[in-house]
Amino acid sequence: MTAPTRTLRVAKPGFRARLDPARRITQAAAALVIAIVALILAFIAWRGIQLFIDAGVAVPEILSPTWQPDPDSGPTTFGLLPFIVGTLEIFVGAALIAAPLSVGLGLFMAEVAPNWARRITQPAMEVFVGIPSVVWGFLGAVLLVPVLRTNFHFTYGYSMLAGQLVVALMILPTITSLSYDAFLTVPRDMRAASMALGTTRWQAIRHVVVPAAASGVMTAIVMGMMRAAGEALAVQMVIGNRASIAFNPMSPIQTLTSAITMDMGNTTPSQPWNMALWTMGLVLLLMSLSFVLLVRRLSARRPAE
Amino acid sequence: MDTQQGDVPVTSATAPAPRAVPSSIPLPALQPMLAGMDPDASVKLRAKDLSIRYGTRVAVRDVTLDVSEHSVMAFIGPSGCGKSTVLRCFDRMNDLIPGAVVQGTVELDGESMYGPGVLPVEVRRKVGLVFQRPNPFPMSIYENVAYGPRRFGQKDRGKLDETVERSLRHAALWDEVKDELRKKSGLALSGGQQQRLCIARALATDPEVILMDEPCSALDPIATLKIEELIAQLKADYTIVIVTHNMQQAARVSDRTAFFTLGEDRAGYLVELDDTLKIFTNPTNQLTEDYVSGRFG
Amino acid sequence: MRRVLLADRLATATLWALALFVVAILVSIIAYFVVSSIPTFSLAFLFSDPVDSGIGGILPLLWNSAYMLVLTMLLTIPIAVLGGIYMAEYAGENRFTNAIRFSQELISSVPSIVVGLFGMTLFVAGLGWGFTALGGALTLLVFNLPLLLRLSEQAIRAVPADERAASLALGSTQWQTIRHAVLPIAIPGIVTGIVLTAGRVFGEAAALLFTAGVATPAHYDFTFVSLDPRSPWSPFHQATTLSVFIWNTNSEANNPQHTEVAAMSSMVLLFLVLAFNLSSRWLGGALQRRVSGL
Ligand SMILES: Nc1ncnc2c1ncn2[C@@H]1O[C@H](COP(=O)(O)OP(=O)(O)O)[C@@H](O)[C@H]1O
Ligand SMILES: [Mg+2]
């Protein structure tokens, strides 16, 4: 790296500063991130619409509840609705289970825990977040599913609820640490101010800390949902993978990620079936995009200033 | 050694302090004399043999003092000598600091604040605390003031409105904010207004004592003046204890002044407590004299 | 009054119970793996080849996990640190940096299986490599780069402004300042970021299914050092990792002892990831002390 001459140090980068090789090289490295993301968007979008262009499937057809991708067993219908509903059920259900636990734990760590307890919970969360998804899937399959089947009389054990529980545990540390951070951003003397007025600690938490951290906590929950919606293997290992719309938590379901995982290896790119899997990828991508935009909105909305 | 001895103008408090502190100054273990007390005024707040430590470190030791009703007492002294610590004892706010241990007694209206069965929550309702940095809640002005009453179960809109208006008027803030009570966030006010909002917020809970910990240290001179005027008015209804590092302020607003300093054992103690005029013109203790004349601290 | 005090007690107790519950879950998970592995686990499991029936071992899979880790990090670290330097030291608030931030956020939200699809199209089919370690590593680069870039940026930003000012005041150029005054101080933070990012490589499986491959290798000849795809040293060898193996073992239950194998493999994986997390804390702290000269 050649060191640029001294005249380049100006407050605002001028023409020559922009030619500074160090600046250019590091900028190129950063730009690579944009390039990669653009490439992914382009690839998935392009392959995702092949189902409509190449296989001639009408766009509304993907909203059909019927999934019959195999031409050998009759006329095909590429309804993605069962997968979309399944994905929704997993991430909404997981968030409903995980959010109270995680936000409560975040509150505990930020407001209630004495130092010694925080010295346990904080590393515990780091370990928790590090548990790989295949390990969660394995645990779900060998511990949870049999229990659901034998003790709770689920037909298969492999079920929506199994998926929701496994994913809830997976996203628990995510929501916990993000909401913990959100609670920590509320200045300490806000609590003291409330308690100096004669409120209990819980009143201070409930009426000052929680409202002030609300948008951060919402962001935490959405980030958890995002992770839940994209989880593939752990879900695939426990939900039973039946591509039909079901609302009973005891029944097997299927998600977008799980379908891609299972069928991608069994199909070839020229098959409409395979193209439909790419369309699922595109749907997932659009979901991610909506999550990101939602998070951006939430974090732009700060408590009244 | 000292040409100004015996006739210390209050304004000299800010004169540059000479670096060298004569080593001959005796550090007396003098218990404060409660001389000069008005025997008629009833005692609102009384501390007796009050010592506070954080963990094993003694922050303040053996403080004994009385604050009479409807008076203003100022705490002065070098930083770190435990003024805030003592102040927090009067509101049981030290209970919130892990490791803080309070020994001795504090009485409010003759009743122990730390006795068995006394709820800190109830003590804090009777004693308001204004912090060094204004700390309004991130909500509207109205909600800030209504916060306390709401928590104590007041749901009646009319009563709340009334309390909010009365408290804001009392804190000399009403006229400035009355048009945007519900729209404007407490955090959108200027520093001085925020501090008065915090005072209004404390007044709304109907306290008997108001504690202020350097309430003007983050404010500009004009805002400071407003708060000082406010203190003079509030005295009629409340008993006030104010910590200040500004000696002119102590002289202007308080009836009595307590001077604390750090002992050789690094623990703070009360050196002298007397009528403010006496403390600033003719203190009994050499340490007080040195401090108010700006010779150290 | 009584009611609010009761509510306070109740809420506090609930939060304690919650914390206890979650920690208990974690402890029982780890205990489950340890206890269930005791009857069958031996060190030989780590050093022998997988078998179709019975316990066997996981040596090739451990090898592949380590191989993928090193390869991915070799690709990721230089780019991420350089990009982090740009974002922390040169970049202003403009469209370009906004685009980078948005890309970072987006990629961290894209499901890894979708990123796997991308890798499959580009490397496996597009470039015709088939399932390779390099294709897998490049796919993992897709998540790891934005993540490590952000962590590096944060570590560099955390360097106090005084350090820069002092160096610039001595007449150093901006790059000299970064190189000699800023980076040395940021190193502990960057290393922590690297170790955290690396830990994720071990755990990742979905993105590798279609890029690095799922076939369980029978045996590796480590004396065969070559670029030939049959060599375990080659970036073009099919590199099924331990995570992928766990998934595969569990979903294709040919082996009557597949549960034991998957459980022990999971335990090994869990401990590897734990070791990474713990060492990132420890390493960060140790480097910090060296940098600050204590
Ligand atoms: N929360 C606390 N924890 C530990 N020590 C404290 C705490 N608050 C104050 N102290 C210590 O107590 C002593 C007195 O502090 P303080 O009451 O704040 O003094 P002042 O208000 O007179 O400046 C200081 O030495 C300070 O370090
Ligand atoms: Mg103080």
Image (cartoon, coloured by chain):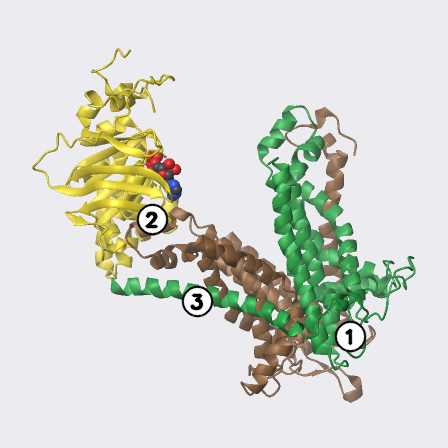
- Which of B153/B171 is in front? B153
Which quadrant of the view contains residue C179? top right
> Which residue shows up at 18% across the image and 25% down it?
B277
Residue B208: % across, % down: 19, 47
- In the rendered image, which residue does mark 1 sit on? A274
Type of amino acid at the residue the image marks with label 2: Ala
Q: Colour of chain C?
A: green
Name the residue tied to disc 3. C17
Marks 3, 1: nearer the viewer? 3
Q: Colour of chain A?
A: brown
Q: Colour of chain B?
A: yellow
Secondary structure of the residue carrying tag 2 is helix
Q: Amino acid at mark 1?
A: Asn
- On whether ligand 1 comes within 8 Å of the CB at mark 2, the answer is no
- B51 relative position to C259: left or right: left
The correct choice, above or below, for C193 with respect to A129 in the image is above
- The percent coordinates of residue B38 (x first, y second) are 10, 34
The disc numbered 3 marks a residue on which chain? C
